[in-house]
Image: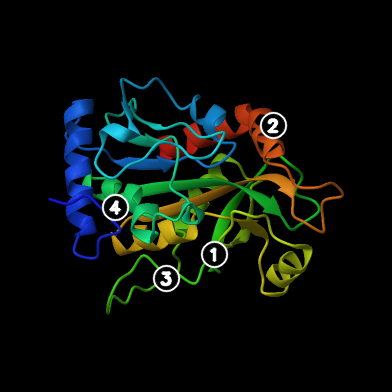
């Protein structure tokens, strides 16, 4: 079986099933229940979720690749919860701007579904469009604008995206932390940061957060039948709002500074799902 996801003759779901089989073999767990995708700045937070009893290099799993962005780790971990469920934690994601195609971007999502996950938590580091959201603020994603001009769906595949970011999971998250705000996430293609004019456009269109990930993954998760919870960590004010030039090191620093709060938040939310 070919695992070249850029090859149109390759069936991406078969590749996902093969990847899930390797994960089951390497972790000793026949299935996982919840998947967690870590975005920029979220690694320290995820370390507080619990002790992993298995860790796998991405490159040992079909069609997965090494981390391409600083602040991500090229491994996936299996974390057992007290109630017997398991969390599959991805330490990185494939970004659309890496040029590996949409199938590669959503491969981890499809693999999680093949591994048995019924819920996926998508996190990211992003620019905030609301001045009151300073660096280190976690925000629930209520909806999104996909400005990548791409979709993970192929052919005549029509999927309803109403309530894509599950209201049940967002309410559950607010039970854990009533101070959580919600916002509309806008994905640009990247890898360059948005211009001030693009940020103004995003605001006019109804956006509250801007970044370079998440929306394509969320669409693939809905197609696979998973419930989706999206959480953004505002790591900086977006261009035109921030008084200083944008810098990826600022993203990493904001993640470290918010690690305790976000780690506690993630752990408590995942325990309730």
**Residue at image mark 2:** 253
Q: Which numbered dot is residue 161?
A: 3
Q: Is residue 168 above or below residue 272?
A: below
Along the polypeptide, which appears first: circle 2 or circle 1? 1
Q: Residues within 10 Å of mark 3 (few under 14, many from 20)?
A: few
Residue 86 seen in render: no
Place residue 190 in its image quadrant.
bottom right
- Contact (CB < 8 A) between labels 1 and 3? no
User: Quarter of the image holding residue 103?
Assistant: bottom left
Residue 219 location, x and y as percent?
A: 40, 63
Lower sequence index among marks 1 and 3: 1
**177 on left or right of 155:** right
Q: Position of residue 126 (x, y in %)?
A: 64, 49
How far apart, in angstroms, are the residues tagged by discs 2 and 1? 27 Å
Mark before the other along the chain sequence, 4 or 3: 4
User: Does residue 60 appear in this view?
Assistant: yes
- Element on which disc 2 rests: helix
Q: Which residue is mark 1?
A: 143
Per the model, the C-alpha gap separating discs 3 and 2 is: 34 Å
Q: Which residue is mark 4?
A: 110
How far apart are labels 1 and 4 at the CA level? 21 Å
């Amino acid at each position: 079986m070919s695992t070249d996801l850029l090859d149109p003759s390759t069936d991406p779901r078969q590749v996902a099933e093969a990847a899930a089989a390797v994960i089951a073999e390497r972790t000793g767990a026949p299935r996982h229940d919840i998947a967690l995708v870590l975005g920029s700045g979220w690694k320290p937070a995820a370390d507080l979720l619990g002790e992993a009893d298995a860790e796998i290099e991405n490159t040992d799993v079909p069609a997965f690749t090494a981390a391409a962005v600083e602040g991500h780790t090229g491994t996936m971990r299996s974390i057992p919860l007290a109630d017997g469920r398991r969390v599959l934690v991805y330490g990185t994601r494939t970004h659309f701007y890496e040029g590996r195609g949409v199938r590669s971007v959503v491969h981890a999502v499809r693999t999680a579904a093949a591994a048995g996950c019924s819920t996926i938590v998508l996190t990211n580091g992003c620019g905030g469009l609301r001045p009151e959201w300073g660096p280190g603020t976690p925000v629930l994603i209520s909806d999104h604008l996909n400005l990548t001009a791409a979709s993970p769906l192929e052919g005549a595949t029509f999927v309803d995206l109403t309530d894509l970011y599950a209201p049940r999971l967002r309410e559950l998250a607010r039970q854990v932390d009533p101070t959580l705000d919600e916002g509309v996430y806008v994905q640009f293609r990247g890898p360059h940061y948005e211009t001030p004019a693009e940020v103004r456009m995003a605001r006019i269109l109804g956006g509250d957060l801007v970044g370079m990930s998440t929306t394509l993954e969320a669409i693939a998760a809905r197609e696979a039948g998973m419930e989706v919870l999206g959480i953004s960590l505002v790591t900086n004010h977006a261009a035109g709002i921030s008084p200083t030039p944008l810098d990826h090191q600022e993203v990493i620093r904001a993640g470290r500074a918010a690690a305790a709060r976000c780690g506690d938040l993630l752990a408590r939310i995942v325990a309730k799902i």
